[in-house]
Image (cartoon, grey):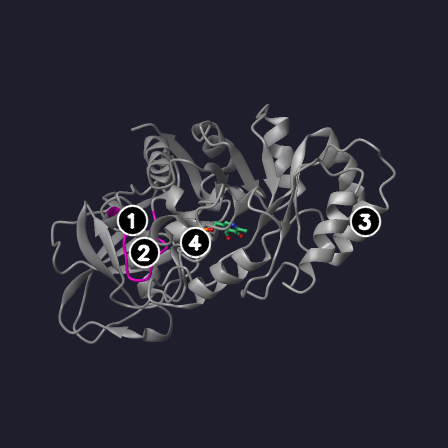
Amino acid sequence: MSRAVRAVMDLAALRHNLRQVRRAAPAQRIIAVIKADAYGHGLLPVARALAEADVFGVACIEEALRLREAGIDTPILLLEGFFHADELPLIRRHQLQIVVHGEHQLAMLESLSTQTPSIPAWLKVDTGMHRLGFSAAALPAAWRRLRACPSIAPEPGLMTHLANADDCNDDATRRQLARFTAVRPSSSTAVSIANSAGILAWPDSHGDAVRPGIMLYGVSPMLGERGRQRGLRPVMSLHSELISVRRCKKGDAVGYGGSWVCPEDMPVGVAAMGYGDGYPRHAPSGTPLLVNGRRAALIGRVSMDMICIDLRGLPEAAVGDPVTLWGADLPAEEIAGHASTIAYELFCGLTSRVKKDYIDG
Ligand SMILES: Cc1ncc(COP(=O)(O)O)c(C=O)c1O
């Protein structure tokens, strides 16, 4: 083995987290969101482990085709629908479901010559996120037009996306839900609203189909929380090892720019891990990591391939000792907090040189 950088995914934890979704939303269909390479966890192994999901949610047709080419026949929803008309024949051939969020998509569907109503669709309404979706005023006409499209399967659903559901005290979610209820065409129209935060904190958002993403990977979407508080288990742990341990002198500046100066004579470790692997360059001195399973702190700037570690609490640490950057005993949420980002970005940011390993339990 050469450079020891690897991400280990616990598939049993993934299945456990899916069960937690079922517990929270027992009557709903589960659209497991596995876009962006399953939030960096690896699309195909994750899809296979989540075989109990009712539908997979992906961002684009390329992600859907990877699933189909691997023999996965679970229904797949394209969360942003299609981008160009030339995707529509593939969408039909592979029986993909689409989200229709804009006028241009409706126009493309209307000009499709097919008479086979075969594409299941969700019409998206913008209830306050102001990203994708028809406005409440435009919705009735869009709904009529979608239902009249010859290629669209009967009974489309209505969906929206929550912008602030990670904050239980933010009234914006209540306002979004009220706007959604007001535009629902009929009480029999299937609805999908809830992301992970909706599932965990907003029961009124559960509707007919929920769309969990980050909670499947063991992270709580709620502000200030850790997945464990919600009974979730972290799926990914990121590992490396010490490639150097040396004694620095009081006053020695460590790393690029010398932003960290040794306050005393002390051991400094170097781990093979850097922003070239996707470790966040903005993680400041003091960001925790585990050496031999015990907490230590990053010091100095993150380089492309290396980070430096304050080993004063671990004087016995030696070259080859394991270093964990996040995982079961060091929540990704905690690292994200130090690096002023979110666990979603940490996971998605891992680069191709990080080897992925899979364990089951
Ligand atoms: C439309 C849609 N639904 C659901 C999700 C899942 O969100 P989360 O990962 O916060 O559960 C996403 C993710 O960005 C999304 O774009």
Q: Is residue 211 left or right of residue 330?
A: right
Q: Local crowd at mark 4 within 10 Å, few (<14), some, or many (≥20)?
A: some
Residue that label 2 marks: 333
Q: Is residue 80 left or right of residue 255?
A: right
Front position in the image: 195 or 126: 126
> Magenta part mainly helix, strand or loop?
loop
Residue 108, numbered circle:
3
Q: Quadrant of the C terminus?
A: top left
Q: Local crowd at mark 2 within 10 Å, few (<14), some, or many (≥20)?
A: many
Front position in the image: 200 or 281: 200
Q: Position of residue 143 (x, y in %)?
A: 70, 51
Residue 227, numbered circle:
1
Distance between the Cα atoms at labels 1 and 3? 42 Å
Q: Amino acid at mark 2?
A: Glu
Determine whether the beta carbon of the residue marked 4 sits less than 8 angstroms from the nearest atom of ligand 1: yes
Residue lying at 19% horizontally and 45% vertically, measured from the top left: 293
- CB atoms of marks 1 and 2 within 8 Å: yes
- CB atoms of marks 3 and 2 within 8 Å: no
* Mark before the other along the chain sequence, 1 or 3: 3
* Mark before the other along the chain sequence, 4 or 2: 2
- CB atoms of marks 4 and 2 within 8 Å: no
* Mark before the other along the chain sequence, 3 or 2: 3
Residue that label 4 marks: 344
Front position in the image: 135 or 354: 135
Which residue is most to the top?
71
Determine whether the beta carbon of the residue marked 1 sits less than 8 angstroms from the nearest atom of ligand 1: no
Q: Amino acid at mark 1?
A: Gly
